Amino acid sequence: MRHLSPFLMAAPLVAWAQTPTPTWSADIACIVYSHCTPCHREGGAGHFPLTAYTEAFPYRNDIRDATQLRLMPPWPPDEGYRSLAHERLLTQAEVDLIAAWVNGGAPEGDPGLAPPPPVFASDWAIAQPDITVRMEDYVVPPSTNDDYRCFVLPINNPTDRSITGFEVVPGNTAVVHHVLVFTDVTGQAAQLDAGDPAPGYSSFGGIGVAGAKLVGEWVPGAEPYFAPSGMGLPLPANADLVIQVHYPAGSTAELDSTRINLQLASGGFVREMALDPVLEHSITMTDGPLVLPPNTVKTFHNQYTVPLPVTITAIGPHAHLLCTRMKAFAVLPGNDTLPLIDIPAWDFRWQGLYAFRHPLHLPVGTVLHGEATYDNTTANPDNPNDPPQWVGLGEATTDEMMLFYFGWTLGSATDTLIVVDSTAHTPHHLDCAPATALALPDMTWAEALAVRPVPADEEAQITGLAGAGTLELRDGAGRLCGRWPVRGTTQAIDLHGLNSGAYVALLHDEHGRVLQHARLLKR
């Protein structure tokens, strides 16, 4: 990038004043090993390992910025709207410690004070599944279209059982867009498979079998699902397990071999559950159809009135690239509103089926509501079309969807006494705890940043700056593209030499903490 002072590019952020500098060994290793390493390790979902100081140090700035922006650990739901089970969240004290460590030079400290890194016996969350089955190797054939391929996974299950946990282990996360898991007792899927000489068979939508039952789904960011105590999804005797795997266009010649792990009830009465898209983009949509003209931002709504007393255990919103927010709530018969989930910054790459801390009981007459906002303009950096095009309902990545899956069962008000997760914070590795307590000064939070024009050409104006601090520009990979001291409430950024694409502007205060951020698009 041209016209930047070498001094500004090299200048470190101001360190924390009059507080001890945290070290990796005494403070940060505990946080990282507890909250980051489960994904950032060999065989994990993270793109680089964080199992030692030497691995974390090169990524120290990325770790600081991603944690301050609450991008990592990935947890899209707004915990202030509803606290959900198994939240992947850092405390503000942990975020501040990481920033103080980085801004203080990221010292290692005494290696003897660091807890030993965690050891993972298996890459599977269900380490000893009752049923584990892998699809045959499949090489995505040459095509310019999305490939929806179904694979029949015969299992040895001679009696009716109940699934209490399921896990999808994608064989190739670079090309697996989603996985739907069904049970089939008709044998139709096996017949369709036998009629296709290649592994599996093609089927757009579902698996092409009437009466097949959805067991679960995997989308980017999803984690294994475990049913509440005493509940389970039915696994009929002699059923085939069938998966539909979506490979987006451009996956040619990639090899995949996805695995399914099932945990089954060991005995006793198990209440039958179901997993259904109760709020969806056709019958329950109140202001459809789901059609997005170019250069528009639209919000759609759906609702469904509960005809029976039910208990809901989990919720899983699903949409594609143009979606920017998804929210669901219930209105009880007494007109009280029950928050369910709010994802204010929808990210297609991080989706999931989210369990409630306690199951929620919905009396007859409860009305479920869903809302989703879509941005089909150039201001949306995830828009797959440039310029924006008409987009409608469909399963391709470039289409759109609006689904809210619910785990549910017939229930009673006493179901709310079932405990799924009562922990306020993820337990730390080996019960470790950071040794340093920071004495932080009060902060004056900046107003929301605004960037004009959108998209920008050779210069962008950023408004909403406040106080002394530093303004940074980073690309989509987190690489630093420029750094400026803040001098006023408005600042011009020179974009000469930058490639077209999406960037993020970060406003740091004088202590290095991120106050605000905004997306910037370079034409």
Image (tube, helix red, strand yellow):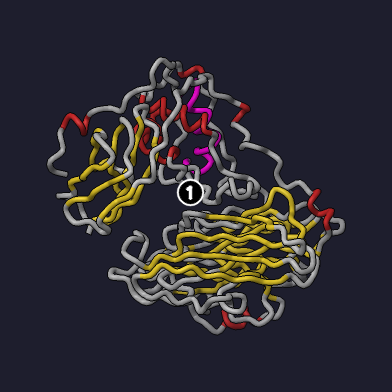
- Quadrant placement of the C terminus: bottom left
Range of magenta residues: 24-40
Up-down: is 167 above or below 33? below
Up-down: is 7 above or below 339? above
- Residue 26 part of the magenta-drawn span: yes
67 left or right, relative to 342: left
Identify the residue under disc 1: 45
Looking at the rendered structure, the kind of residue marked 1 is Ala
> Image quadrant of residue 500?
bottom left
Q: Nearer the viewer, residue 332 or 350?
A: 332
Up-down: is 199 above or below 51? below
- Residue 209 part of the magenta-drawn span: no
Q: Position of residue 210 (x, y in %)?
A: 66, 82
Query: How many numbered marks does the figure carry?
Result: 1
Q: Residues within 10 Å of mark 1 (few under 14, many from 20)?
A: some
- Quadrant placement of the N terminus: top left
Q: Position of residue 296 (x, y in %)?
A: 38, 70
Q: Nearer the viewer, residue 196 or 39?
A: 39
